[in-house]
């Protein structure tokens, strides 16, 4: 019989992921694995993991990875890529990691135009630590550290990383995608491929921001989370290509 | 072997390059700016990479990345910057990543004084970050020693897969002295050192995943974490053989000075002057401040030694705690201290010794 689908070799055969039901981390990690395999890059991949739920893939993927200090993945990637330009170096970071504690490292690596690829998971919340407010938490959205919901006067507004990075001259590719529908999953996969291809072409800094759900900490079931993405997250974080040079 | 006249900071950087260091990331801070500046000029000449990080936090993370990719890598800073680096230092120690860094230390907590001091002893030797890890810590008292220590630090780091610290101060960093520079490692040697680390380096591996690189500064499983901590503890224990100490004129000494780094250099000349006056003074100088040479101090003949004088450019005294552990109340210990960026005076030490003999 013809085999038309197989699990990517970039995921270890005997492992299961530790992600919650309805979480999109597992899906994105699978897409990364598939892209690496299709581009014949699994052997060259060096993944700089952020701290957070993203780190749950470390025992599960088959490619090389290094756990970065919380927020410093772009700096760690800088060190690896500058000294080993033949490796395919990418970071995989959550919104607390990339946009809060790691803001300086993220902006500075982008501003230097480091030839790395960033996969940035924006789920609007701190997942791993149990639902605290993130820089991307929506106005009015409840978090354990903003029990009355995020208030602009007190907490400021959600941060739009693609738009912020789009102010810099150096980045070559900035796209915001999601994984809520099959069409968007295909778009996300294409975006990841593009971010990796840019690195192979020595173009410079590429970022794919993926707006995902966190049913556990949003307090919604998986289907309701998809609705929440459409109704609340996308109006705040519009999907699209912000830059493609 | 070439003999040149060099500033301490620049000599440290040149020694690192000669040892095969091909990556440096750092952030400006006095009194060690000459280290990143020298690397910025020098590394491109040997196909190395210099990055000015956006902070010390970022710089040490870059070094963590480069060293995890198998490169001999270094960073440097001074006291407040070292505190910021402690996150990445702890990660390197946890993941057992070899790298070298220097602290050209300055005065006081907080932003402190930009002038030389020895205010970071306890941080350097006991807790350079969270988690109870340990490192070999070398304390040079001359520019030559700073050069030799930096050169060999990379070998120790690779041997142990652990960070190594060069704990110097603003005097060593700014002082110019004649030095003999060590042999420049050939490109082949540098490459073969890097090649040997390829097995575990995070640069991409064939899909036989038991052998792929996992750089793990922590573990999900408590049993794995305990095992990693036990392995590290066994390494630290093995360092007894690496203790280095200079015992100067201690055989018949009635007053023994304990001092490290630049204070020890000044104390040594005080000992020479005291001896000219017939006063039997001696000096014990820890060369490795971690592991600390407890035995050299513990094995003194306390029927002869009247007192120990601990000399440090630190208020409060810090190394004193280790000296006390070694002496165990067998004789009185007094201190001769200055701080805040003031440099120890030879006369101060001489007076303190004479006072003890009164
Ligand atoms: C220096 C430091 N501070 C705080 C933490 C605790 N911590 C672990 S994960 C995390 C939040 C991660 O959130 P995010 O980046 O949004 O990723 P997610 O878990 O949502 O995927 C925090 C604060 C830590 N590990 N290190």
Image (tube, grey):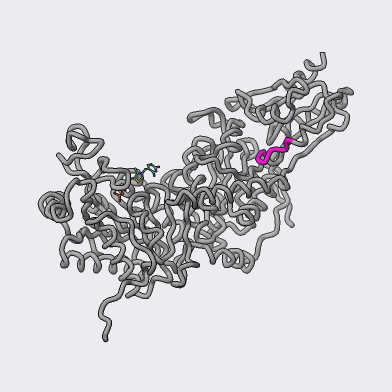
Residue lying farthest to the left in this orientation? A231
Q: Is residue B323 visible?
A: yes
Residue A40 shown left or right of residue A140 in the figure? right
Residue lying farthest to the top in this orientation? B358
Residue B293 forms part of the magenta stretch: yes
Residue B221 shown left or right of residue B7 in the figure? left
Image quarter (top left, top right, bottom left or bottom right) of the N terminus of chain B: bottom right
Q: Quadrant of ligand 1?
A: top left
Residue at 79%, 27% in the rendered image? B256
Closest to the observer: B342 or A136? A136
Residue B46 shown left or right of residue B242 in the figure? left
Image quarter (top left, top right, bottom left or bottom right) of the C terminus of chain B: top right
Closest to the observer: A110 or A1? A1
Vertical order, A193 against B76 (above or below): below
Residue at 26%, 62% in the rendered image? A27
Residue at 46%, 52% in the rendered image? B62
Residue at 43%, 67% in the rendered image? A87
- Residue A31 position, x and y percent, is 28, 66
Vertical order, A60 against A52 (above or below): below
**Magenta extent:** B289-294
- Residue B50 position, x and y percent, is 50, 55
- Residue B230 position, x and y percent, is 57, 48
Q: Is residue B37 visible?
A: no
């Amino acid at each position: 019989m013809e085999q038309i689908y197989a699990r990517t070799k970039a995921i270890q055969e005997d492992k299961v992921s530790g992600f919650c039901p309805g979480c999109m981390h597992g899906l994105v990690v699978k897409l990364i694995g598939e892209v690496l395999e299709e581009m014949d890059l699994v052997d060259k991949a060096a993944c700089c993991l952020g701290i957070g739920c993203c780190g749950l893939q470390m025992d599960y993927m088959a490619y090389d990875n290094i756990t970065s200090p919380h927020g410093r993945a772009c700096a760690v990637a800088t060190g690896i890529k500058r000294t080993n330009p033949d490796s395919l170096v990418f970071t995989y970071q959550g919104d607390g990691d990339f946009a809060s504690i790691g803001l300086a490292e993220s902006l500075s690596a982008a501003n230097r135009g480091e030839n790395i690829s960033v996969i940035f998971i924006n789920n609007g919340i701190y997942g791993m630590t149990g639902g605290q407010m993130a820089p991307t938490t929506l106005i009015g959205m409840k978090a354990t550290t903003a029990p009355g919901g995020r208030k602009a006067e007190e907490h400021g507004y959600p941060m739009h990383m693609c738009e912020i990075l789009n102010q810099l001259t150096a980045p070559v590719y900035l796209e915001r995608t999601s994984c809520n529908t099959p069409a968007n999953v295909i778009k996300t996969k294409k975006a990841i491929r593009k971010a990796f291809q840019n690195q192979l072409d020595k173009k410079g800094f590429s970022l794919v921001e993926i707006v995902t759900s966190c049913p556990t900490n949003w307090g919604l079931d998986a289907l309701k989370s998809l609705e929440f993405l459409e109704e609340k997250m996308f109006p705040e974080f519009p999907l699209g290509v912000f830059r493609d040079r | 072997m070439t003999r040149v006249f060099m500033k301490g900071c620049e000599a440290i950087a040149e020694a690192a390059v000669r040892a095969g260091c091909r990556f440096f990331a750092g952030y400006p801070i006095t009194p060690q700016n000459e280290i990143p500046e020298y690397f910025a000029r020098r590394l491109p000449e040997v196909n190395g990479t210099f990055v000015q990080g956006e902070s010390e936090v970022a710089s040490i993370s870059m070094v963590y990345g480069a060293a995890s990719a198998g490169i001999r890598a270094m960073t440097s800073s001074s006291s407040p910057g070292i505190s910021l680096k402690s996150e990445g230092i702890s990660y390197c120690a946890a993941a057992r990543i070899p790298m070298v860094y220097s602290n050209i230390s300055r005065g006081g907590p907080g932003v402190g004084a930009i002038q030389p001091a020895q205010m970071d002893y306890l941080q350097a030797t006991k807790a350079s970050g969270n988690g109870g890890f340990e490192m070999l810590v070398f304390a040079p008292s001359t520019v030559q020693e700073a050069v030799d220590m930096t050169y060999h630090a990379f070998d120790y780091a690779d041997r142990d897969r652990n960070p190594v610290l060069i704990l110097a101060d603003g005097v060593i960093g700014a002082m110019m002295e004649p030095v003999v520079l060590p042999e420049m490692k050939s490109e082949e040697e540098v490459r073969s050192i890097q090649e040997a680390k390829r097995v575990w380096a995070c640069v991409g591996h064939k899909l036989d995943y038991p052998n792929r690189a996992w750089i793990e500064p922590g573990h999900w499983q408590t049993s794995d974490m305990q095992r990693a901590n036990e392995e590290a503890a066994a390494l630290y224990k093995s360092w007894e053989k690496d203790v280095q100490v200079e015992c100067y004129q201690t055989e018949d000494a009635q007053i023994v000075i304990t001092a490290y780094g630049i204070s020890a250099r000044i104390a040594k000349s005080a000992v020479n002057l005291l001896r000219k006056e017939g006063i039997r003074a001696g000096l014990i100088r820890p060369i490795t401040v971690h592991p600390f040479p407890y035995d050299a101090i513990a094995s003194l003949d306390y029927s002869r030694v009247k007192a120990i004088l601990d000399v440090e450019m630190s208020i409060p005294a810090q190394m004193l705690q280790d000296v006390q552990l070694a002496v165990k109340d067998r004789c009185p210990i007094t201190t001769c201290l200055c701080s805040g960026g003031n440099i120890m005076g030879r006369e101060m030490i001489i007076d303190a010794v004479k006072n003890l003999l009164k």
